[in-house]
Amino acid sequence: MNEKKIFEKQENKIESQKGNIDLLEANLKKATDSVEVLSTMVSDLNYFTLQGNENAMSYFESLGFESDDIEKLVAEYIYEENLTSGDNPIIPFDGINGTMKINKIRFLNHRWIIADFTDGRYWGEMVIEYYITKKKQIELTSVVSLLYPST
């Protein structure tokens, strides 16, 4: 009789562990699916970036530059323009409620940047064309821009 109870107890433990294993396998599948979805999202987000564009990176490498270094150099230059007295000279709009400053930039490739700017009340976006000379001189041109209507 005692052996039967021990056997039944162990059978119950085994069944319980099988349930735990099934639950863990289901959780692992969900986690794996989530990782795949996030990986696809990251890939999509990196598609239009300098670091996600092999051709753009190769362009800079052919000139003897590292794309990471160029990104840092150009970003620093753009943000330093915020420190000038008055509006950032790259922005083609005059500030209405203050001075226009660039808040955020994103490198699209080896030639274009998208930028967000504001004067604290009015917001806009612009595409900046950039060029790096062999002496690492930076040339910037505002290609297109928009200013959102104030609400």
Image (cartoon, rainbow, N blue to C red):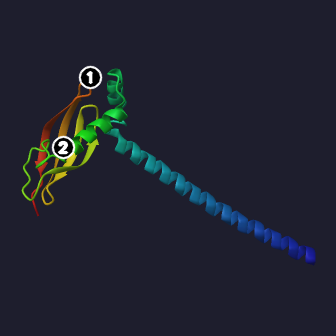
Front one among 102 and 116: 102
> Dividing the image into 4 quarters, which one contains the N terminus?
bottom right
Name the spot of residue 92 as percent of width and height, x first.
Answer: 9, 44
Q: Is residue 58 left or right of residue 139?
A: right
Q: Residues within 10 Å of mark 2 (few under 14, many from 20)?
A: some
Q: Residues within 10 Å of mark 1 (few under 14, many from 20)?
A: few
Q: Disc 1 marks which amino acid?
A: Lys
Q: Is residue 51 left or right of residue 144?
A: right
Q: Residue at x 14, y 56 (%)?
A: 119
Front one among 145 and 23: 145
Quarter location, residue 76: top left
Name the spot of residue 47 as percent of width and height, x first.
Answer: 34, 39
Quarter location, residue 51: top left
Name the spot of residue 123 as percent of width and height, x first.
Answer: 15, 55
Are the residues tagged 2 and 1 within 8 Å (C-beta)? no
**Lower sequence index among marks 2 and 1:** 2
Q: Which residue is mark 1?
A: 134
Q: Disc 2 marks which amino acid?
A: Glu
Q: Which residue is mark 2?
A: 81
Q: Residue at x 92, y 73 (%)?
A: 3
Q: Is residue 22 left or right of residue 58?
A: right
Quarter location, residue 135: top left
